[in-house]
Image: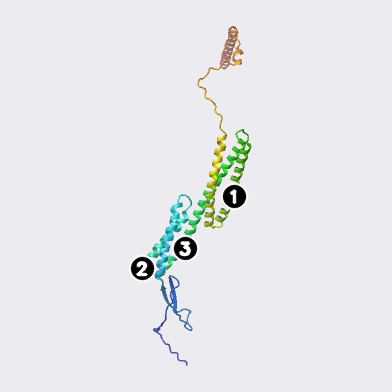
């Protein structure tokens, strides 16, 4: 017979001495003691964990989040109504909520919850900053697109005016060549900007929003100079083609009769002939009335 003695352990006292290393993050959990009990379920006793708090890092991160939130909110204020900012507004709203909760938990000394809310707010702000860059890049890209289309329309008008002026005796051959040379220069600059615009579009499609915005802003800067030169040339050519002026007569003269009015005469009316024709018409009308009355009387006699 085997005698089993069951020993009931009420508690264990453990004394540990040592130095806890400085934290490498806002909140670091260090496991000091692990328990391994034979013939027992794994982790039947949880390890002893010490939470190490870096208070200054908590405070700095909260301040950094608030500053980032203000910066992205400025983008929303600038572009709302100009571009689609719905996603940006949504991200900022969620980030603001988590930042507010993190501040409250920190003041209450609940650092685990504070740490979680800071992490959430950081993710929302990352999304907001990316969306803000997208909003700016798309807006500047659209402005560059409009400017390039406008300059293209102006160059088309210049080409038409230049062709018309070339057929007039208002410029010398040398002057016409100068205009054509300047026009080709404007076209080359416009083509170069169109190539840059294609690059900006590529950056936008690849979600390289900062690069796309920088390229589009460069286009806007150059196209303004090109637009000024093109408009000046257009106005010069337009001034060379002055419309014909038609004088307005002060007094209205009575028009002289045309040859047709002088020689065409209406035939003379023969009133005797008209009287005979009218008489014949009246006789036929009377005969018709008599026939209708006779036919009615005949039908009536038959009915009797």
Q: Distance between the residues labelled 2 and 3?
A: 23 Å
Q: What secondary structure is found at the residue carrying circle 3? A: helix
- In the displayed structure, does residue 114 sit left or right of residue 190? left
Task: Kindly tell me whether residue 281 is visible in this rendering.
Answer: yes
Q: Position of residue 291 (x, y in %)?
A: 59, 13
Which labelled disc corresponds to residue 192?
Answer: 1
* Few, some or many residues within 10 Å of mark 1 (<14, 14–19, 20+): few
Which residue is tagged 3?
123
Q: Residue at horizontal 41%, vertical 74%? A: 51
Q: What secondary structure is found at the residue carrying circle 2? A: helix
Relative vertical location of residue 227 with respect to residue 134 in this rendering, above or below:
above
Of pointers 2 and 3, the one earlier in the residue sequence: 2
Q: Hey, which quadrant is residue 237 in on the image?
A: top right
Q: Where is residue 115 in the image (x, y as percent from the top left)?
A: 42, 68
C-beta proximity under 8 Å, tags 2 and 3: no
Q: Which residue appears farthest toward the left when viewing the image?
A: 108
Relative vertical location of residue 46 with respect to residue 176 in this rendering, above or below:
below
């Amino acid at each position: 017979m085997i005698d089993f003695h069951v020993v009931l352990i009420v508690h264990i006292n453990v004394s540990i001495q040592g130095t806890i290393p400085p934290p490498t993050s806002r909140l670091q959990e260090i496991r000091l003691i692990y328990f391994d009990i034979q013939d027992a379920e794994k982790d039947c006793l949880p390890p002893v964990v010490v939470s190490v708090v870096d208070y200054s890092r908590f405070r700095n991160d909260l301040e950094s989040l608030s500053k980032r939130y203000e910066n992205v909110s400025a983008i929303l204020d600038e572009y709302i109504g100009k571009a689609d900012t719905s996603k940006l507004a949504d991200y900022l709203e969620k980030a603001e909520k988590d930042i507010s909760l993190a501040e409250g938990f920190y003041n209450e000394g609940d650092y685990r919850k504070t740490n979680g809310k800071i992490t959430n707010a950081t993710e929302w702000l990352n999304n907001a900053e990316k969306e803000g860059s997208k909003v700016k890049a798309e807006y500047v890209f659209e402005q560059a697109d409009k400017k390039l289309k406008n300059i293209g329309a102006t160059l088309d008008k210049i080409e038409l005016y230049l062709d018309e002026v070339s057929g007039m005796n208002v410029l010398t051959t040398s002057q016409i060549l100068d205009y054509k040379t300047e026009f080709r220069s404007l076209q080359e600059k416009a083509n170069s900007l169109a190539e840059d615009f294609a690059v900006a579009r590529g950056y936008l499609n690849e979600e390289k929003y900062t690069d796309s915005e920088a390229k589009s802003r460069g286009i806007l800067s150059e196209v303004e100079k090109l637009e000024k030169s093109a408009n000046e040339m257009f106005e010069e050519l337009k001034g060379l083609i002055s419309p014909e002026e038609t004088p307005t007569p002060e007094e209205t003269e009575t028009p002289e009769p045309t040859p047709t009015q002088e020689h065409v005469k209406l035939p003379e009316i023969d009133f005797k002939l008209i009287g005979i024709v009218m008489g014949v018409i009246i006789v036929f009308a009377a005969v018709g009335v008599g026939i209708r009355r006779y036919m009615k009387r005949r039908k009536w006699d038959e009915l009797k």
